[in-house]
Image: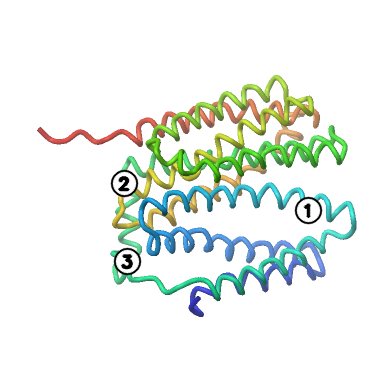
Amino acid sequence: MSPKRAAAPTVLLAATVFVACAPSMSWLLGGRIVQGAAAASFAPSVFAYFGARLPTAVRLIAVTVLTSSFLAAAVLAQVLAQLVVLAGSWRWFFILSAITLTLGLVLAMRGLRPTPGSAETGQNATRILAGLLGRLRIVLLLIATLAILGPFIALYAALGHTGHYPDSELLMLRLSALPALIWAGAASPWLTRIRPSTRMITAFTGAALASTLLVFTGHSVLGAGFGMLLLATCVSVLAPATIQTLTGMSPEHYGSVTALYTFALFLGASLAALPIPVLATLAQVSTTGLVQVTALIAIPIFLLALTFTIFGSRTPQQPQ
């Protein structure tokens, strides 16, 4: 790994150590902002590395496995954080994260190889991004990308805010999505045989149905767990299918399209938890009803994303 490529992981590691030792809430928030900025550069770099180093057939499987690992990390982080807080101080969560990052950085520096220059090398990045954002189909799919992680993360946040479940049940609910994420990685050779746009349309439809199920069953442990399992299955199919669809629209700009995709994906995730406290205060929603209300809001979001996907994935008509 070159010093330039190692800069972002090194900053992320330093920010994580700083957060673990933060003397006040203000310093903690500042450290978290730096963490987010450094972590945001990781996904585009890895996707671009796959695009440069792997042949197409293997690349599709690798992207699916990588995306599933991102989603699984979000689930496992919540589980680990809950266990750490139950056992001691929250600072230990970030200390353990820093140790894990250190090991990952060492492995990456030993395992990564130089990448050949891409078709975008030497081109004006701003001009490339502006050109991509000027294409309606790409913009529609980027808007749909906001809905991939957004409702999923919001529902997890709602589960944590309800106060309705004991710690043991909440732990199981957080783990309920993990089998679906593991399945997506294992099933990637089969999933990649299906057109990515077909996978997106099917998964957005399934996510809307899973949210509908949560509206009616989210008050119970079994109902919430089953609904989150279905939703996680759809999300694990959506994420790699979307990036495959987008990069297929402009393969010569693989890196730039990937950067736009990850920006939209994590922007949706970042905004997801904001409505939870608003619902609890302004709308006077009881904490026990947060899951159902959040699922109710998720339904039109998924349906809107489905509509954008249908129009965005249409093959342009050829001129007569």
**126 relative to 110 in the view: left or right:** left
Q: Secondary structure at mark 1?
A: helix
Per the image, the residue denoted by label 2 is: 249
Q: Are marks 2 and 3 in contact (CB under 8 Å)?
A: no
**136 relative to 15 in the view: left or right:** left
**First along the sequence among labels 2 and 3:** 3
Q: Say which quadrant the C terminus sits in.
A: top left
Q: Residue at x 77, y 40 (%)?
A: 160
Q: Residue at x 83, y 59 (%)?
A: 90
Rendered image quadrant of residue 36: bottom right
Depth order, front residue of 86/179: 179
As drawn, 212 above or below 70: above
**118 relative to 184 in the view: left or right:** left
**First along the sequence among labels 2 and 1:** 1
Q: Amino acid at mark 1?
A: Ala
* Residues packed near mark 3 inside 10 Å, few (<14), some (14 to 19) or many (20 plus): some
Rendered image quadrant of residue 312: top left
Give percent across and percent down for residue 26: 75, 64
Depth order, front residue of 275/139: 139
Q: CA distance from mark 2 to mark 1?
A: 39 Å
Q: Are marks 2 and 1 in contact (CB under 8 Å)?
A: no
Q: CA distance from mark 3 to mark 1?
A: 40 Å
Q: Amino acid at mark 3?
A: Ser
Per the image, the residue denoted by label 1 is: 81
What label sits on residue 118 in the rendered view?
Answer: 3
Give percent across and percent down for residue 215: 68, 23
